[in-house]
């Protein structure tokens, strides 16, 4: 971008500075960059803070979002994930200003935006259905916000063209949205957000309308684009794979309540409660509730000891035990801690294979994994057992998760 | 056109237009066989010979009276009195001069029946009577559709319920109001009456069209920094063009062809074409050779309007906005 004439660069700088002045006292901008491109620092970024933010829809008792406390760092990519109806989209729309906040506050940077109109929040949003203006060309769609803000035409054109270059949309700038494919429309929606150079990007399931292959591809593109632009991003999805692959941190919501916030690794290794344990990971974790006798639990034929400090502090004589399909090793039947699984179905994925089976010698437990009431075991795809065969598996040391049977909170 | 027919027609058209708005764009790449199958079925249904024959007969029956009037309007007065219009074809075949434009001359320029000033009156009445209700209804519909306020639903139902009131009932109260306001005999009485009668349906129709525009489009515009005014003019209006054109045509035809309101509310200075055409028949119905020509003259403008605006009934204007 260095070949831009100096004059244009100056305009861009002034534009940036005026935005600084009006929005925050951020002085991170070094003033040396002479381009419109967000990549080189024209973006001013901001933290986002939810402070006991609550949303109660009129006519309902239960809050859709219940006292959400969440702090998102400058330039961070945070993914809000949860099952449908968990309040993740509502949280995002509260941040966008499209939903009222019935309690608590929301801050962007230092500024309390709880009662600020969406147009004054300096945010850009990518909608699930893209929400492109059908009567405008791609260029007009992307430049609409700038046009409303009264940006000079030449500058709009330039910023739109630069964003189009990033997103590979240059040759489609004069087309109407209806003449684009789904993936292209999705990129236009992204472009519309990028051109704005906002403080925060909000994305509401932007990939859910793409087909599976394109979704995986676009997922990587969005994540790398966000790293490149360095803009604080809040991303909503119901797909935990998307969450794990894209987010710097993940926030899991259920029934309007924040369950856990952490890096993908933390979420996977140390789920804070049974819900997070069952939600994160694919295929889902095997979870069952067992009775504790003499400091150990009986899983099928195996007697598994529970950590002494945990066992002595139980509020009931039951614990919930979780272990991931990939935490199970196929072992000899005689190995200590091995339990036996009758193979009902084998799912082969090439790189992996999963056995769906039922626990033998079961003493009336409800062992389940995700929505199936079967046990899932990851096995070597080169040595796949037959249907009906009985295999012996043991949990890898230290890879079991223990939760309270009453509260569902993590104990180990 | 009666109110009922107008409403029904409008409603029918509206539902078709809505279908067009919400119809999903075909995805031929993904399901080529499905599309072909559907196309084949649709073709089979549409090309049923019986249905075609019935449609043709209905169309013929519908057109014959108008066609007869057209033929009559170009026949000499004496011929009209002597024989029916259908005899004209035999006579024309026999080489007799059966057509003349004398009726049109008489209707347009005849000393007793000067249509030109009535023509002007029709225009003066119709244009504001179309523009006023559309403007007001657009604003009201936007409010009802996209601004959340207390009692919105009740108010909306109440507005549409006004459609139930027959306009004949309102004539005398309205007229006494106009007299009290000292505007009687001017064009204002006619403009205001037409606007009032049109508003409930206009608000209802435009509201439904606005509601069909995906909410995320409005939200995107709000996030993009647009206030209500900008959303209205830059997002809503372009998308509503078909709806506005559709309602515009209905309202234009209704006002242009209206006799009742113009006759009751207006005075001799404001009478439009319809009043004059009705008078043309003469008090004993003797002058109907002039009437036939006058009727066709008054029909020319609605025909032009319809043909000119019908291209706005474009289907699928929303295609590509949101994933469908």
Image (cartoon, helix red, strand yellow):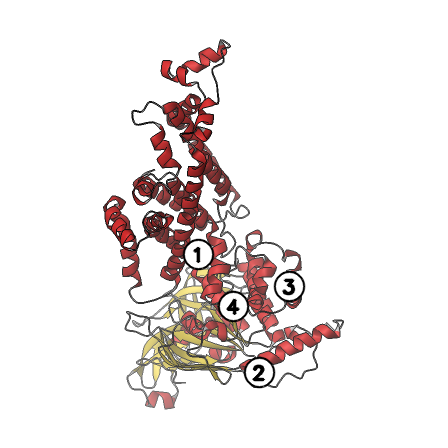
Question: Percent x, y for residue A350?
Answer: 55, 61
10 Å neighbourhood of mark 1: few (<14), some, or many (≥20)?
many
Q: Residue at x 30, y 58 (%)?
A: B156
Q: Which residue in the protein does label 3 denote?
A: A164
Is B136 drawn above or below residue B221 in the view shown?
above
- Distance between mark 1 and mark 4 Cα atoms: 17 Å
10 Å neighbourhood of mark 2: few (<14), some, or many (≥20)?
few
Q: Which residue in the protein does label 4 denote?
A: B224
- Is there CB contact under 8 Å for labels 2 and 4? no
User: Quadrant of the image for the N terminus of chain B?
Assistant: top left
Pointer 4 chain: B
- Distance between mark 2 and mark 4 Cα atoms: 20 Å
The answer as to whether the residues below labels 3 and 2 share one chain is yes
Mark 4 element type? loop
Query: From the viewer's perspective, is A133 left or right of B204?
Result: right
Q: Which residue in the protein does label 2 denote?
A: A21
Query: From the viewer's perspective, is B149 left or right of A116?
Result: left
Mark number for residue B213?
A: 1
- Distance between mark 2 and mark 1 Cα atoms: 37 Å
């Amino acid at each position: 971008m260095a070949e831009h004439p100096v004059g244009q660069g100056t305009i861009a700088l002034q534009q940036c500075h005026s935005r600084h002045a009006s929005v925050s006292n951020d002085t991170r901008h070094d003033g040396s960059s002479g381009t419109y491109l967000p990549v080189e620092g024209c973006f001013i970024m901001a933290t986002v803070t939810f402070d006991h933010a609550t949303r109660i829809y009129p006519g309902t008792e239960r809050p859709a979002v219940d006292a959400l406390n969440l702090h998102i760092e400058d330039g961070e990519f945070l993914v809000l994930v949860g099952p449908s109806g968990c309040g993740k989209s509502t949280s995002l729309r509260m941040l966008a200003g499209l939903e009222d906040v019935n309690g608590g506050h929301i801050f962007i940077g230092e500024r309390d935006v709880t009662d600020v109109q969406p147009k004054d929040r300096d945010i850009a949003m990518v909608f699930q259905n893209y929400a492109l203006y059908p009567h405008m060309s791609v260029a007009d769609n992307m430049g609409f916000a700038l046009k409303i803000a009264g940006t000079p035409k030449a500058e709009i054109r330039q910023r739109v063209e630069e964003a189009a270059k990033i997103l590979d949309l240059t040759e489609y700038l004069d087309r109407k949205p209806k003449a684009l494919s789904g993936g292209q429309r999705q990129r236009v929606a992204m472009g519309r957000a990028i051109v704005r150079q906002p403080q925060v990007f909000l994305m509401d399931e932007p990939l859910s309308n793409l087909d599976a292959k394109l979704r995986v591809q676009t997922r990587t593109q969005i994540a790398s684009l966000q790293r490149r632009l360095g803009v604080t991003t809040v991303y909503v999805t119901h797909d935990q794979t998307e969450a794990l692959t894209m987010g710097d941190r993940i926030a899991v919501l259920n029934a309007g309540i924040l369950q856990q916030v952490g890096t993908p690794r933390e979420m996977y290794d140390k789920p804070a409660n049974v819900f997070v344990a069952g939600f994160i990971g694919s295929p889902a974790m095997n979870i069952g509730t067992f009775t504790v006798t003499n400091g150990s639990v009986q899983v099928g034929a195996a007697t598994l000891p529970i950590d002494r400090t945990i066992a002595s502090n139980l509020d009931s004589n039951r614990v919930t035990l979780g272990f991931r399909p990939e935490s199970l090793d196929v072992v000899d039947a005689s190995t200590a801690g091995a339990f036996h699984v009758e193979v009902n179905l084998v799912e082969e994925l090439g790189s992996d294979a999963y056995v769906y089976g039922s626990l033998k010698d079961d003493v009336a437990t409800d062992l389940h994994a995700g929505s199936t009431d079967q046990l899932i075991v990851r096995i070597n795809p080169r040595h796949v057992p037959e249907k009906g065969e009985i295999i012996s598996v043991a949990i890898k040391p230290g890879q079991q998760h223990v939760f309270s049977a009453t509260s569902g909170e993590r104990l180990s | 056109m009666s109110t009922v027919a107008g409403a029904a027609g409008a409603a029918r058209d509206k539902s078709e237009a809505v279908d067009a708005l919400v119809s999903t764009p075909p995805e031929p790449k993904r399901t080529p066989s499905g599309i072909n199958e559907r196309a084949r079925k649709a073709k089979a249904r549409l090309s049923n010979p019986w249905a075609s024959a019935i449609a043709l007969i209905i169309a013929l029956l519908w057109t014959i009276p108008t066609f007869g009037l057209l033929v009559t309007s170009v026949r000499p007065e004496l011929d009209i009195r002597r024989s029916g219009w259908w005899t004209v074809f035999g006579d024309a075949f026999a080489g007799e001069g059966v057509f003349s434009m004398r009726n049109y001359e008489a209707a347009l320029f005849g000393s007793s029946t000067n249509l030109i000033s009535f023509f002007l009156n029709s225009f003066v009445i119709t244009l504001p009577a179309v523009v006023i209700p559309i403007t007001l209804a657009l604003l009201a519909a936007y409010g009802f559709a996209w601004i959340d306020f207390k009692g919105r639903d009740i108010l909306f139902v109440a507005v549409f319920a006004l459609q139930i009131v027959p306009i004949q009932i309102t004539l005398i109260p309205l007229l006494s109001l106009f007299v009290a306001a000292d505007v009687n005999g001017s064009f204002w009485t006619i403009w205001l009456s037409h606007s009032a009668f049109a508003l409930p349906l206009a608000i209802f129709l435009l509201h439904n069209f606005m509601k069909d525009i995906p909410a995320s489009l409005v939200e995107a515009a709000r996030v993009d920094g647009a206030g209500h005014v900008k959303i209205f003019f830059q997002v809503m209006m372009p998308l509503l063009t078909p709806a506005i054109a559709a309602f515009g045509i209905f309202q234009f035809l209704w006002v242009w062809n209206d006799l009742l309101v113009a006759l009751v509310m207006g005075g001799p200075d404001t009478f439009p074409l319809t009043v004059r055409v009705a008078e043309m028949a003469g008090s004993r119905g003797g002058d109907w050779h002039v009437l036939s020509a006058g009727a066709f003259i008054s029909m020319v403008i609605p025909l032009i309007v319809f043909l000119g605006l019908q291209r706005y009934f474009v289907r699928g204007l929303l295609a590509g906005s949101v994933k469908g």
